[in-house]
Every structure is written in structure tokens, then in C-alpha cells.
Image (cartoon, rainbow, N blue to C red):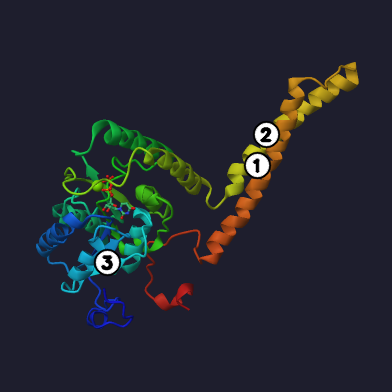
Amino acid sequence: MNTSLFSEERQQFPLFNPVTPEVSVVVPIYNEVESLTLLIEAINTSLSGTELSYEIICIDDGSQDGSAELLKQQAMTQPYLKAVLLRRNYGQTAAMAAGFKYAKGRAVVTLDGDLQNDPVDIPRLLAKLDEGYDLVSGWRQQRQDAAITRLLPSKIANWLIGRITGVKVHDYGCSLKAYRQELVADLNLYGELHRFLPALAFIEGARIAELPVRHHARRHGRSKYGLGRTFRVVMDLSTIFFMKKFLTRPMHGFGLLGIISMSLGIITGAYLTFLKLRFGEDIGDRPLLILAVVLLLTGVQLFCFGLLGELLMRTYHESQGRPIYRVREVIAINVNNSKEEE
Ligand code: UDP
Ligand code: MG
């Protein structure tokens, strides 16, 4: 392996390609050595059929099966292929985020590196994107995965995510998607949130479309996920729900609950005090007393969470220079008049 920091290959194909391609295809790769060559060929075949200029960005997510070496070798001979090798295995979301960072294309397409998604569908996705959408999500109508361990949890998850986020996409789990560059630049990905990209995009104000795509059974290698992901999806779902509803106003969520809980606590407490003072009843061993105390304390805590949330939200937006809105377009004859240009 060449460890020189300023090797010749790097000068020949600099990390930052100055030419801006029209399409960037982003593929996370984790132990997919048998599929890699076929995959790159298939993407090439599919995109060379269009008139578009493109780049393929493969992110090696710390593979141990030689994918990284193969990828490096390929990237040194194919100028449109960029290999980004991560130091260790960070997970699919991180790999995709890395890919988005290097993607220069006006449109960015993502797909899995195991050939389950078919690159043949890419031009159709791009055509749909061109109709004016910010995100086109693939829908694996005839999905080739195990029924009980895969399809069923996925069906439930899609329904649940749709219900909770209000973004009704049939197939959140489909990696084959196309995005506009501006949208990708706005997305912040953490944990395993790549599964919720349409919902996150919706929070960013994206126009979303769906398109049926092909799906094949895995021919090489193994799936990286088991049933455990179902639980992670449920956790992530609550994050997304909160982000969608209360990201810019956490006090409205927590504060309201806090006030309701506090009020109920005060009413219950007042009732008990009344009984004690008016009738001299013994209230010390009444379950109602415990309820009053719990409600009151919970209420105070929720209220404080709301306040903390407000502070954190301000830090979140201000530290990253993220405004609380997203502009789609500015139309003005005299652009220099707009404040942002100054
Ligand atoms: N992947 C990755 N890092 C990981 C796990 C997966 O980059 O830690 C990649 C993997 O190589 C594949 C894609 O993410 O290209 C989807 O993974 P997989 O096919 O195992 O998921 P499934 O299709 O079974 O849902
Ligand atoms: Mg797969």
C-alpha cells in the first residue's frame, strides 16, 4: 500500500475534481467486494445512455473484505470514479453523508452497493427530478427480500413513519433516490437517519415524488442489518417526530404538557388541602396525595425541559448559521438590492 501523503496518483486525479458534473452517484460500500466491479459497470452503462456528465462516488465504510483496495485501484484508472475511504466502519448514514459532502453534481443519486437497486432506473429518477421535484424516492414495488424478517417490519415501519411524519412515501427504506444538490447541502445526517431522508427533506421544505423501481435479491455478500434495526427505527422515529413538530419551538411541546400536569397537580393538591382544613380529614395516606405530588413535579420538570429545549434550539440554529427557514428561490430584477447579497 502506498502511504506517501503526496503520492503521484493523487496529483493525477485530485481529490477535488474542479469540473462540475451534472450528476453525482453516491454509493456506500461495506464489504461488497464481489459486487463492486459489476456495480460500477452498470452505473456507467446506465448513465452513458444519457447525455449527462456524471461522477460516481463510492464511499468505503471501513470494509474488511478488500473492497477498499479494489475501489482504490479502480479509481486510479477511471477518472469519473471517486473513491472516498473512511477510516473505519461508521455505518451507512455516515457513509452517505460523506458521499454527499464530495458530491458536486446538480443532481445527486444514491443507491446501495450490493446491486439490489438497479442503476438502469437512474435516468428515470433524474427525469422525474427534472420535472421540478427536490427529491425523488424509489419504491421497490416488487421487493426481493425475506417476507417475515424484512418485508413485514418494513411495511409497518413505512406506515408508522408516514403517519407520524405526515410524509406518505411507500418505501422509506429504498436507497435508490435522487436529490437536488441544494437539498443535499441542507441535510444534516446523524445516527441511522438515512432511512428518514424523505421526512427530513420534508422538514427542509422539499417537494417529494415517488417512482416504482426495480429490486433484485442479493446475489453476493450478506445483508448488514438484522431484526435489531426495527427498534432503532422506532427510536429514530420519535426524534423525527419532535424535529418536525417542535424543532423551532420546543416550549410549545414541553411547556404545554408541563402546564397541564402542573395544573392537575395543583387542583388535586388544593382539593386535599380543602378536605384537611375544612373537615379535618387525614390526607397523609391517600394515594391522591402521591398523585398530586407526582403531577406537580413532572409538570415543573417538563416546563424546565421546554426552557432548556429553547436554549438548545437557539444554539443549534445560531452555531451552525442555520436559519429557521429555507428559501427555494429569490426572484428580483435587481438582485443587488437583496439584503443577503450585501
Ligand atoms: N452499508 C454501509 N455501512 C454499513 C452497513 C451497510 O456502507 O455499516 C452499505 C452496504 O454496503 C450497502 C448498503 O449500505 O451498500 C445497504 O446495506 P444492506 O444491503 O446490507 O441493507 P439491506 O439491503 O439488507 O437493507
Ligand atoms: Mg441490500
Residue 89 % position (x, y): 36, 57
Q: Is residue 159 visible?
A: yes
Q: Say which of marks 1 and 3 sits in front.
A: 1
Q: Residue at x 69, y 38 (%)?
A: 299
Point out the image quarter for the N terminus: bottom left
Q: Is residue 202 visible?
A: no
Q: In the image shown, does 147 or 125 lie closer to the viewer?
A: 147
* Residue at which label 1 appears: 302
* Residue at which label 2 appears: 261
* Residue at which label 3 appears: 106
- Above/below status of 313 relative to 70: above
Give the amino acid type for the residue marked by disc 2 in the picture.
Ser
Seen as rendered, the residue at the extreme front is 1
Residue 208 % position (x, y): 31, 50
Q: Secondary structure at mark 1?
A: helix
Give the amino acid type for the residue marked by disc 3 in the picture.
Arg
- Above/below status of 274 relative to 193: above
